[in-house]
Amino acid sequence: LDLICVADINEATFLKVNPAFTRVLGYDEAELVNHPFSEFIHPDDIEPTRKVVEEELRQGKKVMSFTNRHRRKDGTWCWLEWTAHPLLERGITFSVAHDVTERRKAEEELKRERDFAETLIETAQTIVLVLDTEGRIVRFNPYMEQLSGYRLDEVKGKDWFTTFLPGEDHTKIREVFQRAIHDIQTHGNVNTILTKDGREREIEWYDHVLKNAQGEVVGVLATGQDVTDRRRREEEL
């Protein structure tokens, strides 16, 4: 349900709230009305909210939008997404809010997961490579930069096969890539890549197809392990 209130921006107080407002926050109406916003808004959100409101009022906007956290009576915090309409009386607003706490929790959890994944990619002592469906380089990690001698910004958008593979391997590895983007597993393939200074490194690859929300293939994520020294030892044996 919509949380609805009438507020005095100049006095920073609620003048009227609807039953949904009291249910979500857990207070009686008398505990909310004529009490300062600062009693309910998260301390970190008070100044940003004030700045947004003042700026949008200065611009003469008829609808103001902002999000902040409010303290429930039980001490927990909920995220409210506001749409505020200034009324004719200066400083009086009619505002509607939606409780978006669960959405924000999901967004924060997703951000933590992404940050964790990003940390793994950035620190992994193995190649992490992303190619689009045409085989162009989208991204690789710092380990690949160290191994190859190329910075990502030097080769981003370039064709992987002609940039990093010996000429005689282009056709064969393109066939492997085509199988990968058609969701055919291609684990354990080994091929040579060329570093910036012309050295050859043997890499063992494990591929995983990447899809968007509609299930369409958008590229390939490949992880690679440098097995050059291991292969040399095997050959010596």
Image: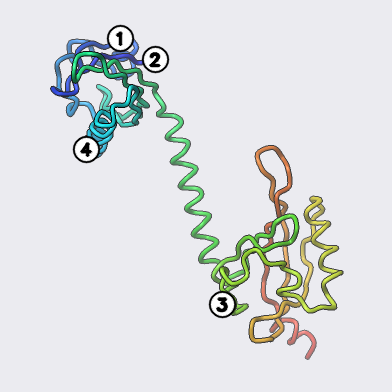
Amino acid marked by disc 1: Asn
Q: Nearer the viewer, residue 205 or 34?
A: 34
Identify the residue position indicated by label 4 in the image: 47
Q: SS class of the residue under badge 3? A: helix
Name which quarter of the figure residue 200 lies in: bottom right
Residue drawn at x 26%, y 12% is: 17
Q: Taking 6 as reference, is 176 above or below it?
A: below
Q: SS class of the residue under badge 4? A: helix
Residue 66 position within the rendered picture, expressed as x and y whole percent measured from the top left = 34, 30
Q: Is residue 190 left or right of residue 120?
A: right
Determine the CA span between mark 2 and mark 4.
25 Å
Q: Taking 184 as reference, is 106 above or below it?
A: above
Q: Earlier in the sequence, mark 2 or mark 3?
A: 2
Residue 150 position within the rendered picture, expressed as x and y whole percent measured from the top left = 59, 76
Q: Is residue 236 left or right of residue 54?
A: right
> Mark 2 and mark 1 in contact (Cβ < 8 Å)?
yes
Whether residue 170 is visible to the viewer of this picture, yes or no, is yes
Q: What label sits on residue 69 in the rendered view?
A: none
- The quarter of the image holding the C terminus is bottom right
Whether residue 237 is visible to the viewer of this picture, yes or no, is no
Q: Is residue 47 left or right of residue 179?
A: left
Q: Nearer the viewer, residue 222 or 10?
A: 10
Q: Earlier in the sequence, mark 4 or mark 1?
A: 1
Q: Earlier in the sequence, mark 3 or mark 1?
A: 1
Q: Is residue 92 left or right of residue 202?
A: left
Residue 217 position within the rendered picture, expressed as x and y whole percent measured from the top left = 73, 47
Identify the residue position indicated by label 3 in the image: 146
Determine the CA span between mark 2 and mark 3.
54 Å
Identify the residue position indicated by label 1 in the image: 18
Q: SS class of the residue under badge 1? A: loop
Amino acid marked by disc 4: Glu
Identify the residue position indicated by label 2 in the image: 2
